[in-house]
């Protein structure tokens, strides 16, 4: 397989084209789905002319960004702490694993009581959803540091700080990136779900409004925007992950 | 050692209950119900006839969603994992699809399937399908090539190759994928019930959220968490056994 990228493009392009034809020919009716070309048109139209668009999109992406930071940094620190306490970790394990079976955003109304309707509730919601993925990934990342690195650091008489920053952190990076990817995905879910349920601004709210108002074109335009944003972030992180992987596991 | 583990679980449980009680004192009854009251309220809920109808609806939806997600994910994952070309082309597409927040697709699911069982199943299955497929791909890809080479040198028959070499080598990671798929399908089914259904435990949750019935929210979430933790603990034990066997 010489050019996997081109094949991939052909497959995705073919799927989009098939969808376009199915929608245009009436195989899929207009209320269910608009043709992909119209999704793009609707999105461009919103970006250029709709007054609420930039403030709502800005609010959502700001909240998601804050939620991501609040899940990655404390998640990493909590992960370090839990790793240092093996007994705590042993009992915490089943809880960490089952956390993502429960829709944490049922607590959203309770967060609203505490923080009020607004960005704070949404950010806490997204961070609550993302942080556990980061904790788990941090635990795994430390586990996977080969023992021999520690020995090498000792032989070279590195100080604990040097060992942590120059040896352990870089060696843990590949798995930490996996954690960051998951934390990003879950933070997005948390914030958008919160906006669906109760909010005064944001893309999730606009999505629900357009669904309730049978404005299918706007609805798909908004989905396309969220999809593109997530795909870009994911591709960037994936590229970083591949580069780091290659450096550590040169095969 | 075993005794210590149980003591640790007891301490963890006490700590959770203590934190929960403290959160209650901080946030007040408008936001949280205390642990004991929540358990009591759950018992009251479970005594009602409607509760078991909802629970049954959730169970049926979850079962169907699991079948679709686990079987579909395994078949596609193994097929892609077995072909290097397909892996190079398709795996990035799958991992992008895995990363999109599927919750934003709930209007599409509603428009396509309407309110009801098939919408819930679709929602649950699309959450579980991708992790199962991706782990199955990884499982097949991570089989050390030396195993295959030695098998070829020893002229192992195709069926024996699958049974005695490929399956044992890939099984641990596949089982991990199934456990994660199981958990995410559970989440997806509950979310499907919240946004695309008029029955089930997820529906009870969203109804309680809409009228701000804090005791109901707390009791139902506690139930979901206990069920999920029990199922996960069991599957983790199975996984540990499979992993130990593989070694």
Image (cartoon, rainbow, N blue to C red):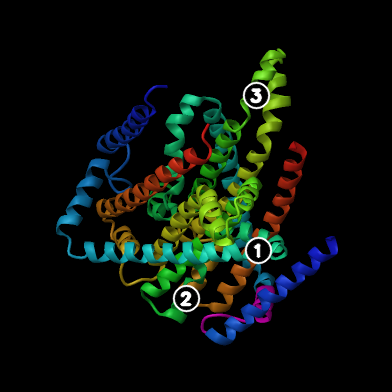
Residue B50 appears in which quarter of the rendering? bottom right
Q: Return the residue at label 3.
A: B146
Alpha carbons under labels 3 and 2: distance apart: 54 Å
Badge 2 vs badge 1, beta-carbon distance below 8 Å: no
Q: Residues within 10 Å of mark 3 (few under 14, many from 20)?
A: few
Does the magenta run of residues contain A19? no
Does the magenta run of residues contain B38? yes
For mark 2, give the secondary structure: helix
Q: Return the residue at label 2.
A: A111
Alpha carbons under labels 2 and 1: distance apart: 31 Å
**Residue A216 location in percent, x, y?**
28, 52
Residue A34 appears in which quarter of the rendering? top left
- The subunit carrying tag 3 is B
- The subunit carrying tag 2 is A
For mark 3, give the secondary structure: helix
Q: Which mark is residue A143?
A: none
**Residue A41 location in percent, x, y?**
19, 47
Q: Return the residue at label 1.
A: A84
B193 to the left or right of A239: right
Kindly report which numbered mark, 3 or 2, lies closer to the viewer in this rendering: 3
**Residue B90 location in percent, x, y?**
44, 33
Instruction: Look at the image and give the residue range highlighted in magenta.
Output: B30-44
Are the numbered discs 3 and 2 placed on the same chain, yes or no?
no
Alpha carbons under labels 3 and 1: distance apart: 37 Å
For mark 1, give the secondary structure: helix
């Amino acid at each position: 397989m010489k050019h996997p990228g081109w094949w991939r493009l052909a497959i995705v392009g073919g799927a989009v084209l098939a969808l376009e034809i199915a929608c245009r020919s009436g195989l899929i009716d207009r209320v269910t789905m608009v043709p992909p070309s119209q999704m793009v048109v609707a999105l461009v139209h919103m970006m250029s002319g709709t007054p609420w668009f930039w403030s709502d999109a800005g609010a959502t992406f700001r909240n998601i960004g804050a939620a991501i930071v609040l899940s990655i940094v404390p998640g990493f620190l909590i992960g370090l702490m839990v790793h240092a306490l093996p007994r705590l970790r042993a009992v915490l394990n089943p809880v960490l694993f089952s956390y993502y079976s429960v829709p944490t955003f049922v607590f959203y109304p309770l967060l609203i009581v505490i923080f009020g309707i607004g960005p704070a509730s949404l950010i806490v919601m997204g961070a609550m959803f993302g942080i556990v993925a980061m904790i788990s990934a941090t635990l795994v990342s430390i586990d996977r540091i080969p023992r021999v690195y520690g020995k090498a650091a000792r032989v070279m008489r590195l100080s604990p700080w040097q060992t942590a920053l120059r040896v352990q952190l870089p060696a843990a990076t590949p798995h930490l990136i996996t954690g960051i990817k998951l934390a990003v995905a879950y933070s997005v879910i948390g914030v958008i779900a919160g906006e669906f349920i109760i909010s005064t601004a944001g893309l999730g709210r606009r999505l629900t409004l357009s669904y309730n108002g049978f404005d299918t074109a706007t609805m798909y335009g908004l989905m396309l925007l969220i999809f593109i944003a997530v795909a870009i972030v994911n591709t960037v992180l994936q590229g970083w992950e591949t580069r780091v992987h290659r450096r550590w596991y040169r095969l | 050692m075993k005794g210590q583990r149980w003591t640790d679980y007891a301490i963890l449980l006490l700590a959770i209950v203590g934190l929960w009680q403290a959160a209650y004192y901080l946030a007040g009854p408008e936001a949280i119900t205390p642990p004991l009251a929540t358990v009591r309220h759950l018992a009251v809920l479970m005594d009602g006839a409607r509760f078991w109808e909802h629970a049954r609806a959730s169970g049926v939806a979850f079962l169907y969603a699991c079948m679709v997600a686990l079987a579909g994910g395994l078949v596609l994952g193994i097929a892609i994992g077995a072909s290097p070309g397909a892996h190079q082309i398709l795996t990035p597409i799958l991992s992008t699809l895995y990363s999109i927040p599927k919750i934003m697709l709930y209007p599409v699911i509603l428009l396509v399937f309407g309110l009801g069982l098939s919408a819930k199943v679709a929602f649950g299955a699309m959450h579980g399908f991708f992790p199962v497929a991706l782990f199955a791909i990884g499982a097949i890809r991570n089989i050390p090539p030396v195993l295959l080479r030695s098998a070829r040198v020893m002229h192992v028959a195709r069926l024996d190759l699958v049974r005695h070499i490929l399956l044992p080598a890939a099984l641990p990671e596949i089982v991990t994928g199934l456990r994660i798929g199981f958990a995410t399908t559970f989440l997806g089914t509950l979310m499907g019930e919240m946004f695309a259904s008029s029955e089930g435990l997820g529906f009870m949750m969203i109804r309680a959220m809409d009228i701000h019935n804090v005791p109901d929210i707390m009791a139902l979430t506690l139930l979901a968490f206990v069920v999920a933790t029990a199922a996960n603990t069991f599957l983790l034990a199975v996984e540990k056994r499979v992993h130990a066997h593989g070694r």
